[in-house]
Amino acid sequence: MSFPWSRKSRPSKESMMVEPRPEISGYQFTLKGSPRHYDDVGKIIEHGGGATVYFGEALTYERGAGVAQWRVKAKSLDWLPSLYDWWAEAERVEPINFTFHLYHPENLRYPVLDLSQHTAEEVAEYIADNMPWVGSDPVTTKPARMSSGEPTMNAH
């Protein structure tokens, strides 16, 4: 019997192949908040399948304070109302108030929004208007103008 970790065993190329992750496309942004809720927030973001946390840190330090960080790519923002509902329940159960901050991916030093001061709809609108879309372009229903000035449905 040969164990896979022994010196004599030689893994096959098939057993060593790793499938690359599919390309993630969507609005790219970062959320920072309480490290205590890192796992719960990550699950809420990824629950519907329209968003993914492509990088996260359960504990990082920013200006001397411990924060959690979720770098997100989201095709849809349907998970935001669920986050707000969970957040209200967490603050009701625990005597500690906390907030989330939204950051632009090009400037992780200063937040662009404090989520406690905005509704889920306002945050979704802000993300759609101001955050970069990475990956394959989203389908648009807004008519674009051709060089002749005539409208066309193809924005590319």
Image (cartoon, rainbow, N blue to C red):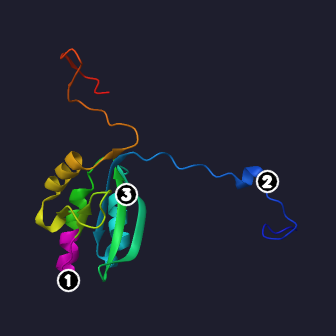
**Three-letter amino acid code at the position of disc 2:** Ser
Query: Which residue range is magenta in the image?
Result: 87-99
Q: Hey, which quadrant is residue 84 in on the image? A: bottom left
Q: Quadrant of the C terminus?
A: top left
The quadrant in which the N terminus is found is: bottom right
List x then y, in percent, for residue 54: 43, 58
Q: Is residue 47 visible?
A: no
Residue at 35% across, 49% down: 50
Helix or strand or loop: what does disc 1 sit on? loop
Residue 96: numbered disc: 1
Spatial CA distance of label 1 from label 3 is: 25 Å
Marking on residue 143: none
Q: Residue 6's quadrant in the figure?
A: bottom right
Sequence order check: which comes first, mark 3 or mark 2?
Answer: 2
Whether pointer 1 and pointer 3 mark residues with C-beta atoms closer than 8 Å, the reply is no
90 versus 54 height, above or below: below
Where is mark 2, residue-wise? 12
**Residue 46's disc number:** 3
**Residue 113 higher or lower than 146, as above or below:** below
Q: Amino acid at mark 1?
A: Ile
Callout 2 secondary element: loop
